[in-house]
Image: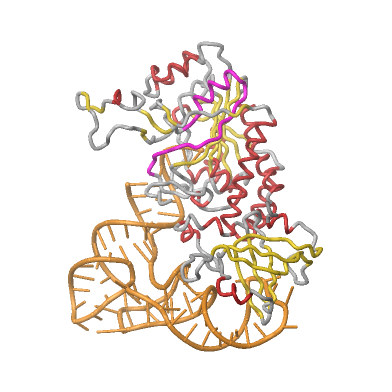
RNA sequence: UCCCCUGUAGCUCAGUCGGUAGAGCAAGUGGCUGUUAACCACUGGGUCGUAGGUUCGAGUCCUACCGGGGGAGCCA
C-alpha cells in the first residue's frame, strides 16, 4: 500500500520520489505555477502539490484538475519554502483517476451549510467537518472498547430483534414477514402465530435486560450496538436508529455505578484529546469555540453529585422563572436540567434518588419507599447524557413494581428468574453514542454525527 | 405530535409601501514567479418550493400542500 497523506506529512522533505493519492480539495493558479491541495481522509490536513506549469503533461490534465477529482501525483517530497506546511510534493507526473465536472459536483471550494450537506450525505464525508466527525467517531468507538476491556468487562452482543413488547423504553419498530396487504386475522386481531417468530417481534430499544442476564454470570459486561426507537420526535438530539453503550455490573451498587460512569466519560474525553488533536483543533476553531478547554477541564475534575431532592431545592431556591414550575415529584424538564448544569454548577452533575413514579420499574427501591436508586448524568448544552440505576434485586419487590407499572409479570419471567436464583446487587447505565459525539465535537445536530441518519421521514440514503 | 421561523442564481443570503431580480462566494475568461480563506479585472448564471386565490399588476398579500431549521414533548 502506498503511504497515506497522514504518513507523507510526517516524513522528511528529503527529495525522495513518492506517489500521493487523494481527492483535489482546492487549486490555486499563479503565473507559471499551480498549487493543488489533496486530501485522502487519513487526516484533516491537506498535502500541497506544486506543479510547474512548464512540465510536460500539465496541459493535458489542467482542465480536469478540479475540486473533487481524484488524482495520483508522483514527485519529489521536499521541504516547503512557503508558510503553512512543512513538506510538499513537487509534481513530476499527474494522473487523474476520476474527474468531477465543476458544473455537476456539488462541493465547491467554499463553506457549505450542514443542512445542504445533509442532502448529499454520500458526498459529505469529503468535507473537513464530516471527515473530522468520522475520525473522531472512530476513535471514540475504539476508546469505548479499550476502557471496558482494560477493566475486564466482557463485550456482549445482545439481540437486535426482540420479542419483549413491553420494555417501556419507547415506541418500537415492528418486524414482520406477514403480508401487510393481507394480514392474517383471528377473531379480528392480527394472528402473530403465523408470523416469522410465531409471536410479535420488534427491533430492540435497549439491550439492558439481556445485558443483566450476562452480568449475573460474567460479573462485568457491556454492550455497544444499534438501538431503535420509533418515536415521532423531531429534534437535534433524536434519531430513530442510534448506537448505545450499556454496561452492567454485578455485585455493584449505585455508587460504584456512578464511579464507573464518571471514569468512563473522562476516559473518552481524554482519549479523543490525545488521539485526535488536529480534528479537535478544527472543532474548537470552526464548530464550537472552547470545546477543547471544556473537555480538558471535565476530564480533570470530579462531577457534582446531588440527590433529586437537592436538585429540586436548588431550582426552587434560585428564584429563576421556569415555564414548568418546579416541585418535588415532577420530572425535570430540559430547562431545569440546563439550569442545573449551566447556571448553578457549571459542570456535569449526577442526580440520584428520583421519585419512583417517574422512573422505570426495574430500579431498586430505596428504604423510604418513595425514591429509587436512579442516577442521571447531566451535561451542559445537551442535558441528560447518561441514565442508569442500581437494579431491583429482590424478587417480590420487582414483581410488585412490574404490576404497579401496569405490566404483565409473565412477560418478564426470565428477567424475574435472575432474582430467584443467586440474586446479587447489580447496576448499569445507558449512554447514547451520538449524543456523546455531539458533546465531544460541539456539533449542534445529531444528524451530523452519524453517517446516514435515520429519523422520521428521513431515509434517502 | 405541538409552537415559531424559513424556502429567491450552484451555495449563503438581501429584496422597503404590491410596480416585473440583487450581492457575496463558487464557476468561466484574462492578469499576476510561491500561493495557502490567494489576489486583481471582466463575463455568464433565475419557472422566486408547488398548486390555487386576491389584484390592472404578486418574490412581496391570503389559503392549502411539500421541503428545511429552531424550540417543546417523548427520550438516549
Where is residue A335 shown, x and y percent of the image? 49, 46
Could you say where residue A134 lies in the image, as x and y percent from the top left? 58, 50
Q: Give how far across and how far down residue A381 sits, in percent.
A: 55, 49
Percent coordinates x, y for residue A364 in the rendering: 52, 22
A93 left or right of A193 in image? right
Q: Which residue lies furthest to the top in this view?
A: A421
Q: Residue at x 58, y 26 (%)?
A: A248
Most distant residue in the right direction = A14
A225, above or below A439, in the image: above
Choose between A221 and A43: the one closer to the eye.
A43
Q: Is residue A352 magenta?
A: no
Q: Which colour scheme is used?
A: secondary structure
- Residue A458 left/right relative to A60: left
Q: Nearer the viewer, residue B18 or B42?
A: B42
Camera-nearest residue between A10 and A388:
A10
Looking at the image, how many numbered discs can be counted on the residues? 0
* Residue A341 against residue A111 in the figure, above or below: above
Q: Which of A103 and A340 is in front in this view?
A: A103
Q: Does the magenta stretch include residue A226?
A: yes
Q: Residue at x 40, y 26 (%)?
A: A163
Residues rendered magenta in the picture: A206-232
Task: Report the residue that reaches farthest toward the front.
Answer: A56
Residue A456, above or below B36: above
- Where A410 sits versus A191, above or below? above
Q: What's the residue at 62%, 27% (across, down)?
A: A154
Which residue is pictured at 64% across the width and 52% down the height? A291
Amino acid at each position: 500500500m502506498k503511504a497515506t497523506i497522514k504518513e507523507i506529512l510526517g516524513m522528511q522533505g528529503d527529495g525522495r520520489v513518492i506517489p500521493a493519492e487523494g481527492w483535489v480539495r482546492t487549486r490555486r493558479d499563479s503565473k507559471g505555477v499551480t498549487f493543488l491541495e489533496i486530501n485522502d481522509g487519513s487526516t484533516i490536513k491537506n498535502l500541497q502539490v506544486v506543479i510547474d506549469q512548464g512540465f510536460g503533461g500539465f496541459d493535458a490534465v489542467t482542465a480536469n484538475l478540479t475540486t473533487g477529482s481524484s488524482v495520483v501525483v508522483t514527485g519529489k517530497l521536499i521541504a516547503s519554502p512557503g508558510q503553512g506546511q512543512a513538506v510538499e510534493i513537487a509534481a513530476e507526473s499527474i494522473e487523474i483517476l476520476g474527474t468531477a465536472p465543476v458544473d455537476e459536483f456539488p462541493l465547491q471550494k467554499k463553506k457549505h451549510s450542514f443542512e445542504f450537506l445533509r442532502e448529499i450525505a454520500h458526498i459529505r464525508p469529503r468535507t473537513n467537518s464530516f471527515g473530522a466527525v468520522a475520525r473522531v467517531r472512530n476513535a471514540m468507538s475504539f476508546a469505548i472498547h479499550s476502557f471496558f476491556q482494560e477493566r475486564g468487562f466482557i463485550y456482549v452482543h445482545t439481540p437486535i430483534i426482540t420479542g419483549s413488547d413491553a420494555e417501556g423504553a419507547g415506541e418500537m419498530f415492528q418486524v414482520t414477514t406477514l403480508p401487510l396487504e393481507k394480514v392474517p386475522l383471528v377473531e379480528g386481531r392480527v394472528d402473530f402465530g403465523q408470523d416469522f417468530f410465531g409471536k410479535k417481534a420488534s427491533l430492540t430499544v435497549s439491550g439492558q435486560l439481556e445485558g443483566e442476564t450476562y452480568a449475573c454470570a460474567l460479573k462485568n459486561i457491556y454492550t455497544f450496538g444499534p438501538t431503535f426507537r420509533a418515536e415521532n420526535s423531531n429534534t437535534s438530539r433524536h434519531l430513530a436508529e442510534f448506537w448505545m453503550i450499556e454496561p452492567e455490573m454485578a455485585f455493584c451498587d449505585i455508587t460504584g455505578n456512578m464511579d464507573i460512569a464518571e471514569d468512563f466519560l473522562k476516559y473518552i474525553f481524554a482519549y479523543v484529546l490525545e488521539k485526535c488533536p488536529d480534528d479537535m483543533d478544527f472543532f474548537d476553531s470552526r464548530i464550537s469555540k472552547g470545546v477543547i478547554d471544556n473537555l480538558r477541564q471535565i476530564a480533570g475534575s470530579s462531577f457534582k453529585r446531588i440527590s433529586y431532592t437537592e436538585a429540586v431545592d436548588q431550582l426552587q431556591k434560585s428564584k429563576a422563572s421556569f415555564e414548568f414550575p418546579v416541585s418535588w415529584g415532577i420530572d425535570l424538564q430540559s430547562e431545569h436540567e440546563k439550569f442545573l448544569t449551566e447556571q448553578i454548577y457549571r459542570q456535569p452533575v449526577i442526580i440520584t434518588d428520583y421519585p419512583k413514579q417517574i422512573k422505570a420499574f426495574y430500579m431498586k427501591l430505596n428504604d423510604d419507599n418513595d425514591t429509587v436508586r436512579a442516577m442521571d448524568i447531566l451535561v451542559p448544552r445537551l442535558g441528560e447524557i447518561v441514565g442508569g440505576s442500581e437494579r431491583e434485586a429482590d424478587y417480590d419487590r420487582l414483581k410488585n413494581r412490574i404490576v404497579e407499572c401496569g405490566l404483565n409479570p409473565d412477560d418478564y419471567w426470565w428477567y424475574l428468574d435472575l432474582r430467584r436464583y443467586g440474586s446479587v446487587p447489580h447496576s448499569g447505565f445507558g449512554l447514547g453514542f451520538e449524543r456523546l459525539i455531539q458533546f465531544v465535537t460541539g456539533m449542534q445536530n445529531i444528524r451530523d454525527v452519524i453517517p446516514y441518519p435515520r429519523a422520521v421521514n428521513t431515509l434517502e440514503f
